[in-house]
Image (cartoon, coloured by chain):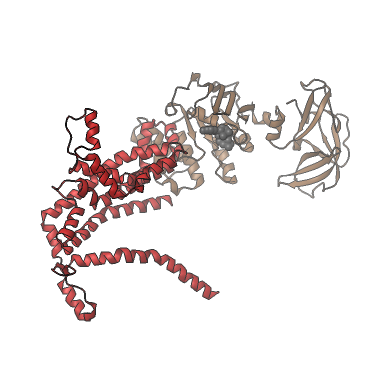
Amino acid sequence: MTIGQAKRSWSARFVVLIPYVWLLALFLAPFAIVAKISLSQTALAQPPYQPLLDLAAGWHGLKDFAAHLSFDNYAMLGSDWLYWLSYLKSLQVAAISTIILLIIGYPMAYGMARASRRLQPMLVMLVVLPFWTSFLIRVYAWINILQHDGLLNEALLRLYLIDAPVAWLASDTAIYIGVVYSYLPFMVLPLYATLEKMDHTLLEAAADLGCPRWKSFWRVTVPLSLPGVAAGALLCFIPICGEFVIPDLLGGSETLMIGQTLWTEFFSNRDWPVASAIAVALLGLLLVPIVFYERLQQRAIEGTR
Amino acid sequence: MAGGAADKPVLVRFDGVVKRFGVVTAVDRVTLDIAQGEFFALLGPSGCGKTTLLRMLAGFETPSEGEILISGHEISAVPPHKRPVNMMFQSYALFPHLTVEGNIGFGLRQEKVGRAEIAVRVEDMLALVRLKGYGKRRIDQLSGGQRQRVALARALIKKPRVLLLDEPLAALDKKLRAETQFELMELQRKLGTTFVIVTHDQEEAMIVADRIAVMDQGRLAQVGKPSEIYERPNSRWIADFIGEVSLIEGTVSQTDTIATALGPLLIEESAAKAGDKVCLALRPEKIRLSEQRPAGLEINALAGTVHEIGYRGDISLYKVRLADRSLMKVALANIGGPPPFAVNDVVWLSWAPTAGVVLTR
Ligand SMILES: Nc1ncnc2c1ncn2[C@@H]1O[C@H](COP(=O)(O)OP(=O)(O)OP(=O)(O)O)[C@@H](O)[C@H]1O
Ligand SMILES: [Mg+2]
């Protein structure tokens, strides 16, 4: 009996451990490696940085290794305008896109939540439908639509809205179109989830107490959907900050987003340490909204108790 | 039990109101007056259309036919937020993102009422529903009974002409419910507001209301004071729905006698004519039980054997089997001492002709 219990508690403990093992193996360990590389220097070698950690050399080797680590790469990031501009560009694209996504996504989610019960599963299905096609292919498709003789220019010309084809590609506009298109489901779904859960009698209560419809939207619906807004905004903002494919395929070459800069350092310049430092710094930057969101969730959890 | 539509001005009038949802007729030709200051109850089994009737008054549903008037004005064109009625919802529908104060003051903030005045009136309301000191709490930090009182305060703060309550006490336990019933009555007397309460609990309706409308499948089955409905039901269905009753089928033979399977029974003179098929309804507490046949000719007496005794604390309900194998219910108050009868005892049931009600429907 006691043995059985001990066994069970061991297996129970093991089950609890799995996510931690997962995090350790797939997140923490790679991060530690990246952080280590970010403190190294480039070298014409394989791998292209040093010092290398040689565990065979024992304690002495470890001390030697630690002595060669430095924060030079971070100092370099801070002193070079190129990197600052990249970070700012990423934050700008992420912030503006998130706002556009909210403006488009909120009415969509609201409409879905208000649609008849029978229609709703199909509407959700339509929102996630694009995922059946590879992300990369969908972004390539946008090149087709936005190019000089693409669908968009054709349509606008036919409608006499423009006289000559507009150069959509290789511009910020193209980046915004691509980002908003790609991330819309990540905004709509969490918003829909909160709006759909909302108790309809709350709106009746508001009307009963003298609130016209438009006012009860702002007084009741919007405040109650804030957790969904926060979830959707973060779900979009954070990955957009690190986005590489969309700006690379659709954007221009004047200012690069941080994901592109990282790619250049890594693949073109073969400067692994600087690329790693960029990644670590980006993570530090994104920690701010993540912590903010955690706080918000904590408050929500306490609220439901 | 003051009031009735007669002695006070009419505040709410339903005139031939019909509501259909597709093929379902939820409310069917309801014509009803509710007086100023009345505590009015809508009573009926589940699905009979009580909530629908209330929601039409609040403005959340529009009648398919007929008119609803408040103080003589037709209100079908008035949207819910402009009607002089407030509703207390069955689920309370309190705003989870606001505090107790925020909820109670919500109605006033929609009008152009100053902050200071709102604060004062919210405090008054908190005192009225005995929630002083709870103003800053969030809704999820309240018990069920406290939420119920916040919902009540929120609906009362705008001083509505009519307060609508949809099963306001359904979520409370029995004891709290009984207390709250008396609180509601006291509140209504103090404020003089017209209350319309929906309930499927007949006891509750009888306790709180000045008048009751009993609904059945969308129609009004009977409207009257609680005592009228209990003592003078107008149909078998009402007699059966309200309280305990024994029904005896028969045919009127003379103006004061009906012929039944149990022999002739004396009745109060009624509108029924000789030859009419009728039903005699007897409340269990109006029947006496005795060992011997009671003396006197002006009384109905039947012999039977005790079949079952249901102890209920204050009373015991005896089921007595009669000569035709039917069962009659008799209630005896438990006044102390050993129970007077046991199962299988032979007993006599007796009642005065005025104790029964002759039902033609
Ligand atoms: N929005 C609606 N759509 C379709 N049918 C409805 C709707 N609302 C009510 N009904 C129907 O109308 C009838 C009356 O419903 P209502 O809610 O008024 O009953 P009720 O007397 O309040 O019952 P309960 O005591 O169970 O609350 C029911 O048959 C119900 O199914
Ligand atoms: Mg109801």
Q: Is residue B58 above or below residue B310?
A: above
Residue found at x 49% / y 73%: A6
Indicate the position of residue B261 as horizontal and vertical percent values: 85, 32
Nearest the eye: A86 or B82: A86
- Which quarter of the figure has residue B213? top right
Residue found at x 20% / y 37%: A149
Q: Which chain is red?
A: A
Indicate the position of residue B103 as horizontal and vertical percent values: 41, 39
- Which quarter of the figure has residue A107? top left
- Looking at the image, residue B165 sits to the left or right of residue A84; the answer is right
Query: Ligand 1 shows up in which quadrant of the image?
Result: top right
Q: Which chain is brown?
A: B
Residue A98 shows in the view: no
- Looking at the image, residue B114 sits to the left or right of residue B5; the answer is left
Residue B270 shows in the view: yes
- Looking at the image, residue B310 sits to the left or right of residue A124; the answer is right
Indicate the position of residue B28 as horizontal and vertical percent values: 59, 25
How many discs mark residues in the rendered view? 0
Indicate the position of residue B64 as horizontal and vertical percent values: 53, 23
Nearest the eye: A95 or B188: A95
Q: From the image, which quarter does the N terminus of chain B lie in? A: top right
Residue that extends furthest to the front in the rendered view of this protein:
A149
Nearest the eye: A197 or A297: A197
Q: Is residue B306 above or below residue A59?
A: above
Q: From the image, which quarter does the C terminus of chain B lie in? A: top right
